[in-house]
Image (cartoon, rainbow, N blue to C red):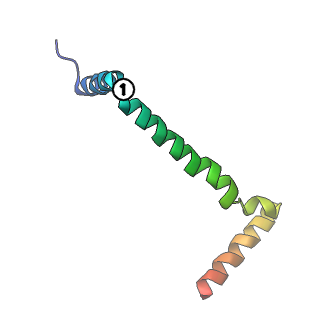
Amino acid sequence: MKSSLPVRIYRFYVEGFRQMTLGKTLWAIILIKLFIMFFILRLFFFPNVLNQKGTEEGKQEYVATELIERGME
């Protein structure tokens, strides 16, 4: 009996990943680099400016003035 297409695709990738040796190391390196890029660097280079504004009204005021000032440029 043939199984459905999604099940066959899933099994294909699972079996391929089990048999990899060098590929697992490369995937680990890729995942570590992605973690560094999206989580660690974000903390240092992209601060959350809106959280520094305090209240909800302060956040709304900041966004409105930024939109107006950037629209004038």
In percent of the image, x 80 and y 64: which residue is there? 53
Q: On the image, numbered disc 1 is attached to which residue?
A: 21
**Residue nearer the viewer, 71 or 17:** 17
Apparent side of residue 6 relative to residue 54 in the rendered image (left or right): left
Apparent side of residue 60 relative to residue 29 in the rendered image (left or right): right
Vertical placement of residue 19 versus 24, above or below: above
In percent of the image, x 71 and y 59: which residue is there? 48
Amino acid at circle 1: Thr
Vertical placement of residue 58 versus 27, above or below: below
Q: Quadrant of the C terminus?
A: bottom right
**Residue nearer the viewer, 25 or 6:** 25
**Residue nearer the viewer, 63 or 26:** 26
In percent of the image, x 66 and y 60: which residue is there? 45
Residue 46 visible somewhere in the drawing: no
In percent of the image, x 33 and y 26: which residue is there? 20
Apparent side of residue 21 relative to residue 5 in the rendered image (left or right): right
Instruction: Please tell me how many numbered marks the rendered image carries.
Output: 1
